[in-house]
Amino acid sequence: MQPSFRKIVIFGVGLIGGSFALALRKAGAVGDVVGFGRSQATLDEAKQLGILDRIGSDVAAEVKDADIVLLATPVAQMADIFVRIAPHLGSQTLVTDGGSTKCDVVAAARAHLGSKVAQFIPGHPIAGAEKSGASAAMADLYQGKKVVLAPLPENPKASVARVRQAWELCGANVMELTPEEHDGVFAAVSHLPHLLSFALVHDLAQRDNKELLLSFAASGFRDFTRIAASSPEMWRDISLANRDALLREVKRYADELYVIHQALQNNDAAKLEEIFSVARAVRSNWTQQ
Amino acid sequence: MQPSFRKIVIFGVGLIGGSFALALRKAGAVGDVVGFGRSQATLDEAKQLGILDRIGSDVAAEVKDADIVLLATPVAQMADIFVRIAPHLGSQTLVTDGGSTKCDVVAAARAHLGSKVAQFIPGHPIAGAEKSGASAAMADLYQGKKVVLAPLPENPKASVARVRQAWELCGANVMELTPEEHDGVFAAVSHLPHLLSFALVHDLAQRDNKELLLSFAASGFRDFTRIAASSPEMWRDISLANRDALLREVKRYADELYVIHQALQNNDAAKLEEIFSVARAVRSNWTQQ
């Protein structure tokens, strides 16, 4: 029996790209897996781990007849990759990505893929993991996880369905949002909390008595600041890539903080309790899906 | 052999008060444990669980010859308890508390204990737990945990040492701060993060698309908002009790947020990366003690 995907090409064989390959392999859904990347050591490791069949050497030849090209690099590198692959993309080849932001990637795709942008179906697998790199890749990383596709008006329905099929073969639940919806949602529930957590720790780090302060920090601090140990480079790039939506969120949050400040200033016990109660009810009812 | 503490009296036999009694019992360090509280059901349960030897009925008689009186009620109830015990406190009886804020408790003690304030050694066990109530009490809750004592200038050294001894028998590491230092430290590392977490969830809760937003929230959101499921009443009281220090912290945090907002507004990648890197380094090196 022919596998669903005869050949996939992956740019950036780390946690996201490597797990995509392993999951499709485990599903018996892929023939040839070819990898490109900046680090020869990572590519060698990915080959050794059975993620890749081959390390690619000729982009033009590889993307000509691939079924799917997955861009799983940091978002800031994707424009360059679009430039490299654009002239060589076969007419049957679909391109997708795993970036945490979508409007910026779509803009880069439009700028560099030309009319072939119809072959690009933007995506974002929601599979945060503490680890990164090819060695962290797992066949079941996407099992039961959400993957957002953010299709373009130019995408033929069959092409969207084909990329959806790949992620579903990985075990993921695929949702669709527009790129704008995607960036608004993630600015609110992911990018803003990261910024706020970094901000708290950065503020403490500036103080003369930081050692004393940190010695009394306990489990509330531990949970609140876990995401402040995230990669500075990655979050610099995400923050700038989703700048407009994130600026709106920061402004909105500052307004919320002002309301709480005023309630505290005015000794307004009822207002404070109301705010805390609403938050508690929503947070207690929420369960990670 | 005589136990170290012949008799202790506990006001508020929940997680904090109940665990104090169980820990001293386990250490063989206490004779009689007497409890007072607002809820007869809780007192009955505490007696059944072996936390209490007796449910108290006569405050005057019980606090006259107790070695230690522990106030383990919400902070807002402590002033009333000072009023009730003040006329009857024996000269050898020490009073301590388990409140999350100290300056307000000290002010209440000064107002209501008169010259007997010298017998009051303020305390704060740092043993956050998800659960509350007598049934959650555990003999090893304080094992390896921090307890802050915030002694007053009026406290004889021997009295501070005696309360320290009780907590050390519970397995705790006892530290000393002034009440002002205590409130400043906990405003920064505990009260502010709680406020910020409540604020984020409250802001999301106001939106028309909150269901959509929450459906895409993942592990970063989960950790950041875990403390937004804390008790609204308790955090209303803590916020107001530590209002001055907390207002300073909110103001400081708003300034920090403004700096990040400006860096984002100006596309200042270097500044963002610097802030995130400092935060990450501090958070990665921090370990809960």
Image: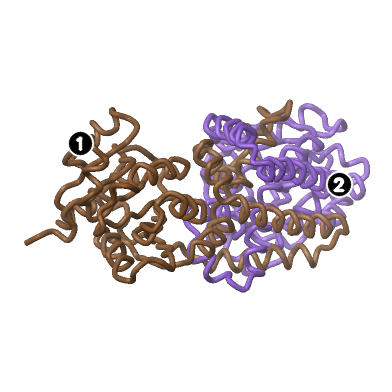
Chain colours: A brown, B purple
Position above or below: B7 against B60: above
Question: Residue A283's x, y, as percent?
Answer: 57, 64
Q: Which mark is residue B109?
A: 2
| Disc 1: CA contacts within 10 A as few (<14), some (14-19) or many (>=20) | some
Task: Give the crowd class for mark 2: few <14, some 14-19, many >=20 residues within 10 Å.
Answer: many
Residue at image point 73% right, 26% down: A208
Residue located beneath label 1 in the image: A47
- Residue situated in front as seen by the camera: A85 or A258: A85
Task: Give the chain of mark 1.
Answer: A
Location of residue A258 (image quadrant): bottom right
Residue at image x 65%, y 56%? A249
The residue most toward the bottom is B208
User: Which is more toward the observer, B34 or B180?
Assistant: B180
Q: Residue at x 57, y 44 (%)?
A: A219
Q: CA distance from mark 2 to mark 1?
A: 70 Å
Residue B107 drawn above or below residue B288: below
Residue A198 seen: yes
On the rendered structure, is A51 left or right of B141?
left
Image mark 2: chain: B
Residue B195 in the image: above or below residue A175:
above
Q: Is residue B180 left or right of residue B259?
A: right
Q: Quadrant of residue A36?
A: top left
Is B62 rendered above or below residue B187?
Answer: below
| Amino acid under disc 1 | Lys
Q: Amino acid at mark 2?
A: Ala
Farthest-out residue, left: A1
Quarter of the image where the C terminus of chain B is located: top right
Q: Quadrant of the N terminus of chain B?
A: top right
Q: Is residue A100 left or right of residue B209?
A: left
Task: Find residue B41 and report its horizontal and vertical position in percent.
Answer: 62, 69
Residue A243 position, x and y percent, is 61, 50
Q: Horizontal and vertical percent for residue A158?
A: 29, 70
